[in-house]
Amino acid sequence: MKILILGGDGYLGWPTAMFFSKNGHNVKILDNFVKKKIESEENVRPLFPQIPLAERVELWNKNVNSPIKFVFGDLLNHRLLYEVLKDFKPEAIIHYAEQPSAPYSMRGRDSCYFTQNNNVLGTINLLFAMKKFSPDSHLIKIGTMGEYGTPNIDIEEGWLDVEHNGRKERILYPKKPGSFYHLSKVHDSNNIEFATRIWGFRCTDLNQGIVYGLETDETKLDEKLTTSFHYDDVFGTVINRFICQSIIGQDLTVYGNGTQIRSYLNIVDTIKCVNIAVMNPAKKSEFRVFNQYTEILSINEIAEKIIESADSIGLKVKSKSINNPRIEQENHYYNPKNTSLMKLGLNPVKINKGILSNMMKKALRYKDRILKSTIMPRIKWKKE
Amino acid sequence: MKILILGGDGYLGWPTAMFFSKNGHNVKILDNFVKKKIESEENVRPLFPQIPLAERVELWNKNVNSPIKFVFGDLLNHRLLYEVLKDFKPEAIIHYAEQPSAPYSMRGRDSCYFTQNNNVLGTINLLFAMKKFSPDSHLIKIGTMGEYGTPNIDIEEGWLDVEHNGRKERILYPKKPGSFYHLSKVHDSNNIEFATRIWGFRCTDLNQGIVYGLETDETKLDEKLTTSFHYDDVFGTVINRFICQSIIGQDLTVYGNGTQIRSYLNIVDTIKCVNIAVMNPAKKSEFRVFNQYTEILSINEIAEKIIESADSIGLKVKSKSINNPRIEQENHYYNPKNTSLMKLGLNPVKINKGILSNMMKKALRYKDRILKSTIMPRIKWKKE
């Protein structure tokens, strides 16, 4: 299958590209390296040293039958996007090419503007490129469970049947996002649903939980094939941050009272889910939403599991509550559904002591690269 | 009161500015003249000849105690916006400064990109300018009833109480917009609701019906104070288009079967509603939504009223159905609520033969300026 991966240099994009290439697909990746630029701006860096994407692709391609092709480019450059879709005519487009940090989007006007510009208008260009050159491509867009917020009702998969004053309607599930980054994803979903409705596209919106994990089957093949793993306050997600805090002996920083419940999945399950979506495309004119997560835990439960796993390999660590830099509900109902991917065969990896302590053991080898000053939250949601 | 009017050169912005100035308020207007630019691009022009804004302001200011101040500028220029908010510290900000044409947003990639960029990112800049320099200003944002689409349930004012699996939540009323322009307004509302929630702003979102009308009490004072009235396929709304078609003897162009029901209000009621919003500000941290329309009619009912009114002044006109350039439901339920503005004292003008025939009489004086080639829809929603 011809698969175009937008944002193919990222934490998820790069392992996804290797996975599909290994499975014999014709993979092309596009990236504008904007995450690398933000790393420099914010003085953060991935845990593992990475070689440049072009070299990584070259290295990977030595041992595969179906090599990855790489194009440098930006979704804001619509002419390039037009050329790529015209020439490649992908059967699936996996769209990871968005600024992925909620804190970065809240840092100030410039980074908020950048986020919504890059994400929303990049996706607009993609929709018009599809309309013109590849209307039958299956668009797989990475959204986030954070778009929903923490509503007091069960979170369905993208759509909700409501009854009001005795009449019924099926509506896009109401969103209550918690940052300008999450809002950019909501805007994208709304734009994509409309394009699907009027132009007959086939689209899958994957509302993904918080991803954790250091490696996939493909990154393990060679240290130089590592993915961009972050633990910092800009790009780091909570489990990944706690892993790094454990190995440097820093208290696990629980934002607020830690009763916030969130949904999670392992990076290897991200790849599996995206593969399931690719292999089971949406129908024409279908805007399909899957909630892509495998388990639900509070921040305190995560911290406990980390502490226990650290202890099992001789690392003593404790958690401490710090002022929550975000504005979010700390005590709330949370009951999202995730049956669609399960029904399509997802067999998930669950968080356990072995997985977490193995992450710690691997991370320990790069302990000296951890920049301690980048872990505490430097960006606050509140008005100063 | 210090009132900042963004988009103060427009069909609604200019009469709004004169109204508040006449009532003794300290009015500053900002405009980037982008509508004038699009007029040139699309080869359309307002029915009445207009003098440039700076001259109009000068003329208006000769006879008032509270002169209007005008600043040329673009919301995308955040430095200018910062300066204006810092210096002027408005008590109310009336935000009309958006590309207002649904067809233009659907013309192609460039005009869609322009629309979402101008509207969404301009509003982002405004939110950050408010955060920094004027967090207590009451933001009054002009939205549209078109954001809701035509759902099968009653349309409430911005929020909806839902019960799902035995639990309750109050959600932002689900939107199903019908163009990339309408989507830009939905994105704005989502961004503004979030900013209000986390930064404690006071905001009113006015979801306005389709405005019709040639003049207000202030534009009537001098022909040179006329507002930008459009009848064309880019900026013209249905009643205004039908008025012009009647006077040139062109069949009224009903899109599709004409059973689409929409909400309407007279331009004089727009001014009244905005005034009510200004005089009754939202509370701190309140994102308040008013549905701003005064009556509901199908396109066929509008056409009948126009035909009857034309007949009463000796103009013979008929309607004809043409292929609908838009993709929209033609047979649908439609029951929006508009009690909030009524409760606050709105006493609306209703469509009647007198109003419509007076519009025709006034428009007749400019009959020779009507560009017949700009009336039929040139932009289609469907994939070519």
Image: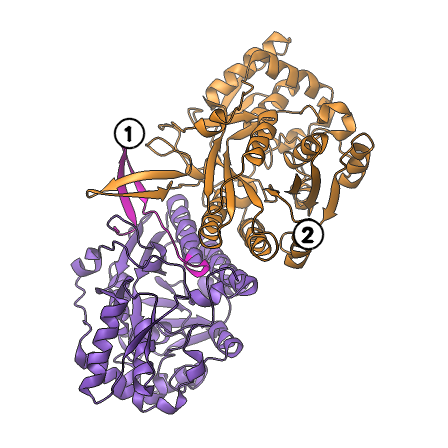
Chain colours: A purple, B orange
Residue A120 sits above or below residue B38 on the image? below
Confirm or deny contact between disc 2 and disc 1 (CB under 8 A).
Answer: no
* Image coords of residue A126 (percent x, y): 46, 58
Q: Say if residue A296 shows up in the picture.
A: yes
The residue indicated by pointer 2 is B84
Q: Position of residue A252 (x, y in %)?
A: 31, 77
Q: Amino acid at mark 1?
A: Asn
Q: Are marks 2 and 1 on the same chain?
A: no
Q: Secondary structure at mark 1?
A: loop
- How many residues crowd around disc 2 within 10 Å: few (fewer than 14), some, or many (20 or more)? some
Q: Nearer the viewer, residue B250 or B177?
A: B177
**What residue is drawn where x is 21% and y is 56%?**
A340
Q: Is residue B50 above or below residue B354?
A: below
Q: Which mark is residue A165?
A: 1
Query: Nearer the viewer's eye, disc 2 or disc 1?
Result: 2
Return the x and y of residue A20 as percentages of the image width and height: 30, 73
